Image (cartoon, grey):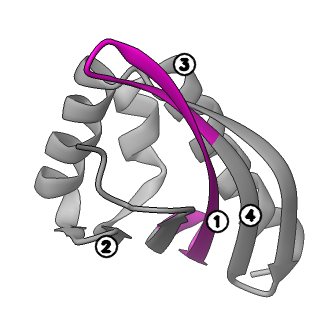
């Protein structure tokens, strides 16, 4: 996979995430995808769907992409995440590291500055 395809997969992920379009978001993952954030790990379509549906419903998250770097099937991003926790809007710098396969995200590891736990 060349760099533009990997970058396009991650940019489409961010756009679907910000639109809270769960169907488009899930279409951007491989069937066996894994997602790690803090102590939370989700594997496969069912777990990923539950994770993102819950976040979209309760946290109202939005991502702002600041930098994106590609190397073949790997993408690294510097972003800002804005979300609502216990009725309060909070903003966190985050870094995301993605592996893309066949134009879809196969794995991601997300690091949030400070505590990865929200409560």
Q: What is the spatial separation of the Cα atoms under label 1 and label 2, in whole angstroms? A: 16 Å
Q: Which residue is mark 3?
A: 19
Element at label 4: strand
Distance from the alpha carbon under mark 2 to that under mark 4: 17 Å
Residue 101 in which image quadrant: bottom right
Front residue of 28/57: it is 57
| Mark seen at residue 36 | none
* Residue 77 - label: 4
Q: Nearer the viewer, mark 2 or mark 4?
A: 4
Ranked by sequence position, the earlier of labels 1 and 2 is 2
Q: Residues within 10 Å of mark 3 (few under 14, many from 20)?
A: some
Residue at 69% across / 82% down in the picture? 74
Q: Which mark is residue 34?
A: 2
Task: Specify start and end residues of the magenta stretch as a single range.
Answer: 81-105
SS for callout 2: strand
Residue at x 74% of width, y 81% of height: 1
Distance between the alpha carbons at the discs numbered 4 and 1: 6 Å
Q: Are marks 4 and 1 in contact (CB under 8 Å)?
A: yes
Find disc 1 in the rendering and name its residue. 95
CA neighbours of label 2 inside 10 A, class few (<14), some (14 to 19), many (20+): many
């Amino acid at each position: 996979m060349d760099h533009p395809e990997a970058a396009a997969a991650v940019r489409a992920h961010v756009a679907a995430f910000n639109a809270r379009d769960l169907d488009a978001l899930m279409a951007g993952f491989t069937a066996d995808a894994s997602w790690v954030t803090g102590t939370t790990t989700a594997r496969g379509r069912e777990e990923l769907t539950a994770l993102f549906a819950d976040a979209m419903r309760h946290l109202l998250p939005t991502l702002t992409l600041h930098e994106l770097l590609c190397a073949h099937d790997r993408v690294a991003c510097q972003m800002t995440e804005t979300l609502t926790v216990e009725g309060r809007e909070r903003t966190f710098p985050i870094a995301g590291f993605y592996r893309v396969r066949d134009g879809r995200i196969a794995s991601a590891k997300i690091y949030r500055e400070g505590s990865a736990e929200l409560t």
